[in-house]
Image: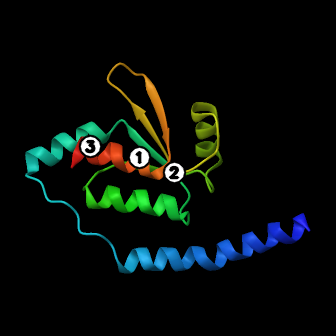
Amino acid sequence: MRLFFKYFFKTAHYIIGPIILLLDALTTPKAMERADEAQQQVNASTRNLVLYQFRMCPFSVKVRRAVKRLSLNIETRDALREASSREELLQGGGKIKVPCLRITDEQGDTTWMYESSAIIAYLQTRYA
């Protein structure tokens, strides 16, 4: 029975995932416009952010859409397809769960933020 559910959910993922990506591509949010100097400051500030995500995860898509809407230049790493990224996520954050935003402050301290709603709220508070 467990094997049935494993394959059922895996099959559902491969059917629904591409649909999610297609809908995301067709309804891409409009990016926020900033003055060049302001955008350069935002870009400098986001250099210390890394988003660990799975390409077809709906919660990862939700965060990527917020990043696009806020015109943020945040590095993304696919923790499903890239073994090194998955290992970084496990070692740093303590669990392989996406989306996860790695935030490194000016002192070099690192925070691992899970939960799409928390990540979006953090980004909106800081960059909106």
Q: Are marks 2 and 1 in contact (CB under 8 Å)?
A: yes
Looking at marks 2 and 3 on the same chain, the residue that comes earlier in the sequence is marked by: 2
Residue 69 image point, x, y percent: 27, 61
The Cα atoms of the two marked residues, 2 and 3, are separated by: 18 Å
Which residue type does callout 2 highlight?
Pro
State the SS at label 3. Answer: helix
Using a 10 Å C-alpha cutoff, classify the residue at mark 1 as few (fewer than 14 neighbours), some (14 to 19) or many (20 or more).
Answer: many
The Cα atoms of the two marked residues, 2 and 1, are separated by: 8 Å
Q: Report the side of 89 relative to 123 (left or right).
A: right
The Cα atoms of the two marked residues, 3 and 1, are separated by: 10 Å
Looking at marks 2 and 1 on the same chain, the residue that comes earlier in the sequence is marked by: 2
Q: On the image, numbered disc 1 is attached to which residue? A: 119
Which residue type does callout 1 highlight?
Ile
Residue 32 image point, x, y percent: 19, 60
The residue closer to the viewer here, 84 or 104, is 104
Q: On the image, numbered disc 2 is attached to which residue? A: 99
The residue closer to the viewer here, 5 or 95, is 5
Q: On the image, numbered disc 3 is attached to which residue? A: 125
